[in-house]
């Protein structure tokens, strides 16, 4: 028997319209911390920092039975501002969250995007990480003092390598250091690299005078003696690492990179409360504690409103540094 | 000798039935997903990360190695058959592979690619075992001025692919360079040619450019001139490589790794530039130059072998230095960290079983890949027998899926269409497509290295030539440029004597 | 020779004009860039765009001269290409339209519907006239792709207006 055209068309239309919803698993119950159809956006590429945070958080939340399947997806671009713009556009969507961090704050400034983090609903800060100042093992700079003396003398001759583009964390840290050391940020010779890999090679090969990066990235190279750690940038020394803080070295500044979660604007109180509760319970779960340990992340949990205040304060600080640079 | 013993132990790990099974599953999954549009090896490894959560580390990494190599090969398959490369390393394979497929030699093209992958991967992995510490030490000495010198050399090589009309070839190259300019300036973060659109801030992905120029451009061009006469199906031809095919390609398979491996090992090397350099080398050395652009088998074999060897080179710097030189390596690094393992200088001492098991499983994975794909090549090639309207509709469909799946942005589809229309115009007026793709790859890389070199030297131009490596490369460039002149002088002398 | 055929034979001049415009665009964009604040050395953010822009303008002029002197770009031949027939721009426009419709529709109607329309529309434009077979093939292919990406691989594609309703 031959199919007739109207039937074929009808069949085709049914297939594509009704198929997808029928293939989706029955929606998850909407009770407790469970948010059915929750999606988690990552504003940078797979393998990047926000990506690992988001995927780990989603996996831990599922394992701890806090929620059903969480769909993690990447929307990379322009230092995270493409994702931010999409998030702000999803006004009132209580089933979407985005992992982000200090880098996004800087990118909003350098890209002059109309949508900023003030437009989002802050959910929580999760982790923080100090930056480190490192040189290759054959470098002539033995201590942070050696380095600072030479740097103050001729900032242009001492290229600083960092794994982020201007406005990112590895760029902000040396700029704050320079400010505290009395060097005009404009005189700092900052060389951006694509992520930590190329940067590591150029520090090892002494192509740059020193490098600035997250503490977790080069632990092994430091332990193996290929890199010499001169200082950590946070308020306190890092246990297990033999290096002074910037304050101890006489620079009145500190810098800590952090990561957190924000949601779209325009949520009802109940929706916002639900996301905050979910993340709070995730933070209390043994699975998340275990993940913090394996990844070497520092717990820096700060939920809801307080995170919002923190975001605004970070935004001001980043803005003032970048303004001085003319970015 | 030490490493040989460790490797034998590694084979002991890799050849247990369970690990063999993981390797086989990895290769199969990798190939299946690599064939899908828009999903390159990095994405494939990232997507399959959860599959390995339940495994112990050794099994998981053995599976990863399989996925990685499988996905690379899968990417070449669509590149050859449908002219839609799934990842940047497979772009060059489309140039000769697709004309071969259209002429009914798809099975041979796929076989040449499969064996190329095998040869490149094998040689690359052997080099990894023998040279890893040495290469790693050398790799960190390569700096911005050296990269720039290599890019200049690559630009000289572009002249050999400009085609019959130099001016049209140059126009094509400039179109590519213009597309390469789009996005944030790497050094100062300023937007160039983005017209205020954030989606354009990271530039146009080279895969989008290649799919647009190759697949969409071709589909539109064919639509304009579709042969309306009885559409005879594409002949399938013999399924295997003939003796003269092998004769033409065995040297290409061996030459590929020489170019691919070192590029993979250096931090900013990647796979695009070595595949392109390999293509140009094969064209120069081939006895069948007239076939290039119309389906020369060497143009598939060499670049594929180079791509695979460059993947092995990537592992050198990742395992010994903890240096992720490509997106795939970055994802694998993340995977290592899932297990609380930090790749880097101490990895070989701390986890010898895992590392040598992984290296041994690379060999195993490559054998499995070849065993799987050689018999499948003729089956894949039959794909082209479906009627023309479905074939080209399918190409458009899958190109669109690939472009959309990456970021879920409708704008990417519009960009793809615009580049497709450029491709159509280029075909109409005889502009070769290859220089444009090379412009997109080389332009941004060369600019970045040039400016980085100047930044490091604090603005002094001498910073561009202050390494022995760069000086050597520039000397080669000068000789290459002066060669036609020199030859004339030599011949004239010979004549007057 | 009428002016019309003169122009038709030299339509490549239009391509030269496009290249020229592109060059001007690149040059104006480069000139709007801020002076380099943090970089060093003679090469700033505008240097390379200026070189490329000038290159485009020069090549556009040379190409036009070549066309006026009688040079012609050789249209690309191929297995499926029949150059003896005049170009069928209607099909090209139809295909481009279908593709653009896909880009516009994928958000509101979801991937399976938009994808099916893309495949079916393209096949129709390319001359397939199996009115009952084509829609079914298109729908099946689109739904299968949706399932593989969205369900099996976790690459999200929009499901359509009925998601969550049924």
Image (cartoon, rainbow, N blue to C red):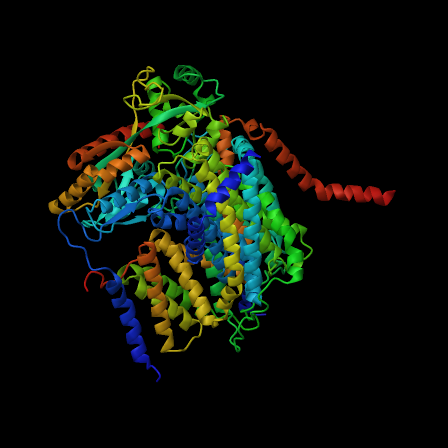
Quadrant housing residue A279: top left
The answer to which image quadrant residue B34 occupies is bottom left
Quadrant location of residue B185? top left
Decide which of B51, A172 is in the foreground and name it: B51
**The C terminus of chain B: image quadrant:** top right
Residue nearer the viewer, A97 or A126: A126
Residue C23 showing in the rendered view: yes
In this view, which residue lies farthest toward the right?
B497
What is the count of numbered marks?
A: 0
Please say if A244 is above or below B181. above
Residue visible at 61% across and 58% down in the picture: B297
Between A210 and C78, the one nearer to me in the picture: A210
Residue at x 50% of width, y 30% of height: B454
Q: Position of residue A233 (x, y in %)?
A: 32, 23
Spot the residue most to the left: A270
Above or below, C2 relative to A259: below
Q: Where's residue B429, x and y in %?
A: 55, 60
Residue B415 placed where, x, y %? 40, 54
Question: Can you give x and y, in whole percent of width and height, for residue A109 in the image?
Answer: 31, 36
A171 or C58: nearer the viewer:
A171
The residue furthest bottom is A1
The answer, for residue C76, to whether it is visible in the render is no
Q: Is residue B53 left or right of residue B168?
A: left
Task: Assign the N terminus of chain B to one quadrant of the image.
Answer: top right
**Residue at x 53%, y 41% (from the top left corner):** B8
């Amino acid at each position: 028997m031959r199919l007739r055209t109207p039937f074929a068309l009808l069949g085709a239309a049914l297939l594509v319209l009704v198929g997808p919803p029928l293939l989706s698993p029955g929606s998850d119950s909407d009770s407790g911390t469970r948010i059915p159809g929750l999606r988690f956006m990552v504003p940078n590429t797979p393998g990047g920092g926000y990506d690992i945070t988001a995927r780990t958080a989603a996996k831990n939340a599922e394992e701890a039975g806090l929620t059903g399947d969480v769909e993690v997806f990447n929307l990379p671009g322009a230092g995270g501002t493409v994702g931010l713009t999409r998030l702000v556009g999803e006004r009132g969507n209580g089933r979407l969250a985005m992992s982000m961090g200090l880098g996004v704050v800087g990118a909003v400034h350098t890209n002059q995007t109309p949508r900023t983090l003030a437009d989002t609903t802050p959910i929580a800060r999760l982790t923080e990480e100090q930056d480190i100042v490192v040189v290759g093992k054959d470098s002539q700079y033995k201590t942070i003092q050696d380095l600072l003396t030479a740097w103050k003398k001729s900032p242009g001759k001492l290229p600083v390598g960092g794994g982020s583009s201007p406005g990112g964390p590895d760029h902000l840290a040396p700029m704050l250091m320079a400010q505290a050391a009395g060097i005009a940020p404009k005189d700092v010779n900052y060389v951006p690299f694509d992520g930590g890999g190329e940067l590591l090679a150029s520090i090892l090969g002494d192509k740059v005078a020193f490098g600035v990066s997250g503490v977790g990235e080069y632990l092994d190279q430091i332990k193996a003696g290929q890199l010499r750690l001169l200082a950590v940038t946070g308020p306190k020394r890092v246990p297990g690492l033999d290096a002074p803080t910037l304050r101890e070295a006489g620079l009145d500044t500190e810098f800590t990179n952090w990561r957190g979660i924000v949601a779209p604007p325009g949520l009802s109180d109940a929706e916002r409360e639900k996301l905050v509760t979910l993340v709070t319970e995730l933070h209390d779960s043994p699975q998340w504690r275990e993940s913090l340990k394996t990844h070497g992340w520092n717990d820096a949990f700060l939920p809801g409103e307080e995170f919002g205040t923190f975001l605004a304060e970070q935004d001001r600080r980043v803005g003032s540094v970048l303004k001085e640079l003319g970015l | 000798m030490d490493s040989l013993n460790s490797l034998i132990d590694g084979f002991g790990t890799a050849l247990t039935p369970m690990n063999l099974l993981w390797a086989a599953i990895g290769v199969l999954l990798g190939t299946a997903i690599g064939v899908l549009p828009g999903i390159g090896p990095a994405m494939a490894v990232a997507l399959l990360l959860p599959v390995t959560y339940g495994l112990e580390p050794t099994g998981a990494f053995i599976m990863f190695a399989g996925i990685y190599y499988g996905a690379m090969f899968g990417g070449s398959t669509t590149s050859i058959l449908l002219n839609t490369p799934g990842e940047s390393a497979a772009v060059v394979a489309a140039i000769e592979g697709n004309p071969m497929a259209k002429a009914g030699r798809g099975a041979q093209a796929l076989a040449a690619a499969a064996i190329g992958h095998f040869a490149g991967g094998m040689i690359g992995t052997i080099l990894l075992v023998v040279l890893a510490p040495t290469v790693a030490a050398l790799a960190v000495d390569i700096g911005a001025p050296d990269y720039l010198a290599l890019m200049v050399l690559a630009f000289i090589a572009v002249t050999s692919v400009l085609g019959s009309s130099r001016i049209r070839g140059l126009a094509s190259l400039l179109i590519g360079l213009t597309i390469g300019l789009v996005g944030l300036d790497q050094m100062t973060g300023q937007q160039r040619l983005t017209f205020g659109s954030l989606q354009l801030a990271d530039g146009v992905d080279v895969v989008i450019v290649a799919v647009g120029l190759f697949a969409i451009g071709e589909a539109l061009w064919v639509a304009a001139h579709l042969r309306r006469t009885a559409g005879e199906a594409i002949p399938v031809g013999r399924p295997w490589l003939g003796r003269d095919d092998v004769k033409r390609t065995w040297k290409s398979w061996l030459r590929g790794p020489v170019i691919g491996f070192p590029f993979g090992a250096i931090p900013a090397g990647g796979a695009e530039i070595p595949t392109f350099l390999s293509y140009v080398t094969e064209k120069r050395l081939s006895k069948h130059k007239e076939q290039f652009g119309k389906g020369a088998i060497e143009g598939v074999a060499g670049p594929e072998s180079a791509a695979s060897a460059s993947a092995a080179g990537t592992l050198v710097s990742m395992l010994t230095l903890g240096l992720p030189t490509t997106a795939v390596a970055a994802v694998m690094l993340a995977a290592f960290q899932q297990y609380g393992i930090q790749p880097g200088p101490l990895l070989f001492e701390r986890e010898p079983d895992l590392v040598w098991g992984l290296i041994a499983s690379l060999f195993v994975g490559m054998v499995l890949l070849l065993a799987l794909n050689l018999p499948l090549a003729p089956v894949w090639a039959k794909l082209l027998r479906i009627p023309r309207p479905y074939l080209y509709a399918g190409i458009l469909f899958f190109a669109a899926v690939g472009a959309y799946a990456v970021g879920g942005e409708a704008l990417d589809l519009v960009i793809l269409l615009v580049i497709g229309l450029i491709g159509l115009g280029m075909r109409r007026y005889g502009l070769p497509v290859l220089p444009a793709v090379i412009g997109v790859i080389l332009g941004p890389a060369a600019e970045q290295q040039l400016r980085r070199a100047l930044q490091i030297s604090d603005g002094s131009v001498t910073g561009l030539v202050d390494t022995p490596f760069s000086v050597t490369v520039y000397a080669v460039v000068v000789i290459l440029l002066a060669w036609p002149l020199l030859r004339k002088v030599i011949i004239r002398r010979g004549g007057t004597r | 020779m009428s002016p019309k055929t003169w122009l038709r034979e030299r339509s490549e001049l239009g391509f030269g004009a496009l290249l020229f415009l592109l060059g001007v665009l690149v040059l104006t964009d480069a000139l709007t860039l801020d002076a380099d604040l943090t970089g060093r050395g003679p090469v700033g953010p505008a240097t390379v765009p200026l070189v490329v822009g000038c290159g485009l303008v020069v090549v556009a002029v040379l190409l036009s001269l070549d066309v006026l002197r009688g040079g012609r770009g050789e249209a690309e031949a191929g297995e499926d290409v029949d150059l003896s027939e005049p170009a069928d721009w209607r099909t090209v426009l139809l295909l481009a339209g279908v593709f653009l419709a896909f880009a516009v529709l994928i958000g509101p109607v979801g991937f399976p519907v938009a994808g099916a329309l893309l495949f079916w529309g393209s096949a129709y434009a390319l001359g397939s006239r199996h009115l009952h077979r084509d829609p079914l093939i298109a729908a099946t292919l689109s739904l299968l792709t949706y399932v593989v990406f969205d369900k099996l691989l976790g690459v999200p594609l929009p499901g359509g207006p009925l998601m969550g309703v049924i």
